[in-house]
Amino acid sequence: MEYRRLGRTGLKVSALCLGTMTMGWTSSRADSFAVLDAFVEAGGNFIDTADIYSFWAENNPGGVAETWIGEWLAQRRVPRHQLVIATKVRGRMWEGPNGEGLSRQHIMKAIEDSLRRLNTDYIDLYQTHWPDDDTPLEETLRALDDLVHQGKVRYLGASNHPAWLLTKALWISDRLGLASYVCLQPHYNLVHRAEFERELMALCRDQGLGVIPYSPLAGGFLTGKYRRGAPPPPGTRGTVSESVRRYMTERNFALLEVLQEIARAHGATMAQVALAWLLRNPVVTAPIVGANTPQQLRETMGALQVQLTDEDLARLNQASAWE
């Protein structure tokens, strides 16, 4: 396993981060435990979750992923200090006007709930899941700073923030002497480049922010399981989600052909090459990968052994260029 510093901090995290959005959605409790076991056995130490995971699944009220991670920690007796656990706050977790958002009121209850579910007394990386237009940034940042000083949170991160808002947050923290964001979790992959590369990438590079991209395989599109003119593959219930359907353009199918050629040349899978492309970006710390089974996880982690050439990078960048 390769380890990298999280942005400008001294914190070392595995070069692949295990995402847990599938827990209680497409992964059972037993399979989730097996994936966590396999990840740690392979040297992984970076686990990302969120309080709302995965409320959109049937019979899942949210908080399930955090709960299962906490139960796994207790059952396996994994040394807590060996792991870097990241979670997020913002989404609706209880009824009433303060059941969601980034107000001090919501954050102070949400952190206690997450700590209880995760069966821990601190969170390594606490991230604001997406912006809250109803709450002043200063209120949010002061509440987060208090959590750091209380020892309940060690580092702060943001997710789904535009460059102007992230810049403003960094400026407020600097001006007021508050603990500040040290990383960004953006939506970033070979077929969704512009949102991050247009302004956020330069900002993260300049400010020394770590970058932990989510959806690095574009909902499975970059694995090659969706083909031009072919029916949806088994396991998709005969349907394709709107988030994946938007990638199904002639240009992106042409990109898949390039991806496949490079994968064959390296004796790798298309998914491994798509991840290796992200890992070659010096701004990226650790892509967030999900898995339903240990076998799927082990295959994904093979991306760490794929060494793309400069020519490979040039071909992938040209095929996926957004400018």
Image (spheres, rainbow, N blue to C red):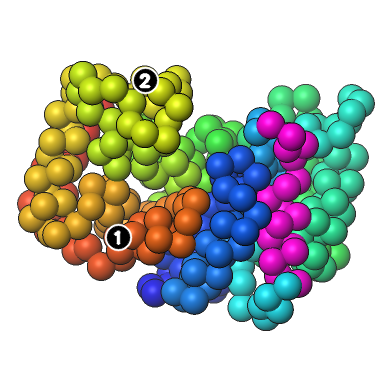
Q: Is residue 71 magenta?
A: yes
The residue under the point 36% across, 57% down is 300
- Left or right: residue 209 versus residue 54 is left
Cα gap from disc 2 to disc 1, whole angstroms: 25 Å
Instruction: Identify the disc placed on residue 246.
Output: 2
In the rendered view, does 16 fall on the left or right side of 144? left
Provide the secondary structure element on which disc 1 rests.
helix
Percent across and percent down for residue 86 are: 64, 57
Residue in the picture at 57% in, 57% down: 31
* Amino acid at dot 1: Ala
Above or below residue 244? Residue 168 is below
- Crowding at dot 2, Cα within 10 Å, few <14 / some 14-19 / many 20+, comes out as few
Residue on which disc 1 sits: 303
**Residue 308 appears in the figure:** yes
Quadrant of image for the N terminus: bottom left
Q: Nearer the viewer, residue 94 or 25?
A: 25
- Up/down of 195 relative to 116, above or below: above
Give the residue drawn at x 71%, y 25%: 133
**Does residue 37 show up magenta in the picture?**
no
